[in-house]
Image (cartoon, helix red, strand yellow):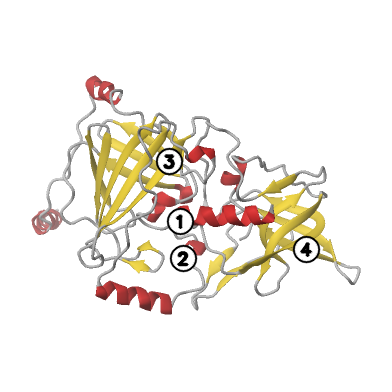
Amino acid sequence: MAGCLVAAFAATIARTASAHHGFAAFDTSSQRQITGTVKEFQWTNPHTWVWVDVTNDKGGVDTWGFEGMSPNFLGRRGWSRKTLQPGDKITVTYFGMKNGSKGGEFLSCKLPNGQEMRMFGASPTEDN
Amino acid sequence: MIAVLGCVLFASAAIAQDKPFRRPAPTAADWAALAKLPDFTGVWEIPMGGPATRVTNPAIGIPPMRPTPLVLTPAYQAKKQDLIAHADEDNQSANCLPPGMPGIMAQPYPMEFLLTPGQVTIVIEAYSMVRHIYTDGRPLPDDPDPNFFGTSVGHWEGDTLVVQSVGFTTQTEIEPHVPHSDKMRILEKFKLLDPDTMSIETTVTDPEALASPYTSNRILKRHRSWTIAEYICEQNNRNYVDQNGKAGVNLSLPKDNSPAK
C-alpha cells in the first residue's frame, strides 16, 4: 500500500506541474512512521499542517510538524478541517526532513478509529 | 490654468496610442448566442488517474498525452544548462510566486470557465489567478506589456475555442529551467470530447528559444458539484527558498497556535 501511494504521487507530478513547491527539503528515499498526539491541525493554504506531540526517549515530549496537501485538494477527497482534533492519538507516515529536524511531509495517518487517511492518490469523493 | 492646459496638450501629443478597443454593451441577442456555444461553463480539473481519465465516448478518442519534443535553439539550450548549473534548491513557487503560462494551466487544482458576451474567463484556483480571453473581435495587441499570462484573444471555429496569447515576460519559464524569449506565443485549442470532458491542446512557439513548436495535450473533467475555493498562498506559507537558493521549511508552531507570520 505504501508503494501504491508513492507511485500515485509520482504519476501526479508527471502529469501536472508541481503545485506550490518541490520536495527539496524532504528525504523522499524512504517513508517513516511516528505515533503521537495531535497538538494542532491547521486547515490552511498553501498547505495543511499537523503538529504532533511525541514522547521522546528521555521521557519528555517533542512537537513534530508535518506538512500536508492544500485543504482545497483534501476537502474534495474525504478530509475536513475537523478530521484531526487536538488530543487525537495518530500514527503518521511521512517523508522526513533532510536536515534531521522533527517533522516532514505528511503522507498518511491512522486515526483513533483505525481509519487510514491519505494525502495523495485519493480520487475525488464526488464523481460529478 | 494655462500651464495645466499646456501639460495636457503636450501629454496627448507625446503618447500616440491606438484608441483602446471598446466593447459595446451586450444585446439580448449576444446573451442568447452564448446558449448556442458548447457548454464550457463550470468547474473543471485535470484528473489524476483512475476511471475519471477515461473519455466516455471511445469514438471521439483521447488526444496523445505525450507532448511533442521540447527542442531548444542552441542559444537557449545554453541558457537552460546555465539555469540548471546555478539552480536554487527549489523554485520561486515556494515563495508563492505563481508560474506563468503555460504552467498555470497544469496545476493540480480546478479551473472555472465563465462565458459572457465577448469574453471567456478562466478562474484558476491555484494561487487565485484569472485569465481573460477576449472573443469580441478585437485584434491581438501589437506591443503588449509583457506579463505572466500574456494577452489572449480567441474565436470559435465550430465547436473549438481557438486562443492566441502574446506578450510574455521573460521572468517566467516554459517548463522548469526552460526559459523563453519575449517573442513566445501560445496557441490553445479548447474543445469538448464528451459532455463532461474537455481537451486543451497547447502549442508554444518561440522563434528565438524553440527550434520547433512544443505541443502538449491535457484533459479536464467537469465537476458540477464543485466550487472554486479560495487559495491565498501567503495565508500560512512555511516554505521558502532564500537569496542563496537554499530551500527550507519552518516547522515551528507559534505559541498561540496561529498560522505562520
How many C-alpha atoms fall within 10 Å of the one at disc 3: few (<14), some, or many (≥20)? many
Q: Quadrant of residue B131?
A: top left
Are there few (<14), some (14-19), or many (20+) residues within 10 Å of tag 4? Answer: many
Q: Secondary structure at mark 4?
A: strand
Q: Earlier in the sequence, mark 1 or mark 4?
A: 1
Distance, label 4 to label 2, CA atoms, is 28 Å
The residue pinned by badge 1 equals A17
Q: Secondary structure at mark 3?
A: strand
Indicate the secondary structure of the residue bearing disc 2: helix
In three-dimensional space, the C-alpha distance between marks 2 and 3, rounded to whole angstroms, equals 26 Å
Q: Which of the chains bears the disc numbered 1?
A: A
Q: Farthest front residue?
A: B59
Q: Crowding near pointer 1: few (<14 within 10 Å), some, many (20+)? A: some
* Residue drawn at x 37%, y 57% as measured from the top left: B100
Instruction: Indicate the quadrant where residue B143 lies.
Output: bottom left
Q: Which residue is under mark 4? A: A63
Mark toward the viewer: 2 or 1:
1
**Residue that mark 3 sits on:** B220
Residue drawn at x 48%, y 61% as measured from the top left: B93
- Discs 2 and 1 lie in a common subunit: no
Front residue of A14 and B66:
B66
Q: Position of residue B141 (x, y in %)?
A: 18, 51
Q: Are marks 1 and 4 in contact (CB under 8 Å)?
A: no
Estimate the spatial distance between the alpha carbons at disc 1 and disc 3, rounded to whole Å: 14 Å
- Label ID, residue B92: 2
Whether residue B157 is visible? yes
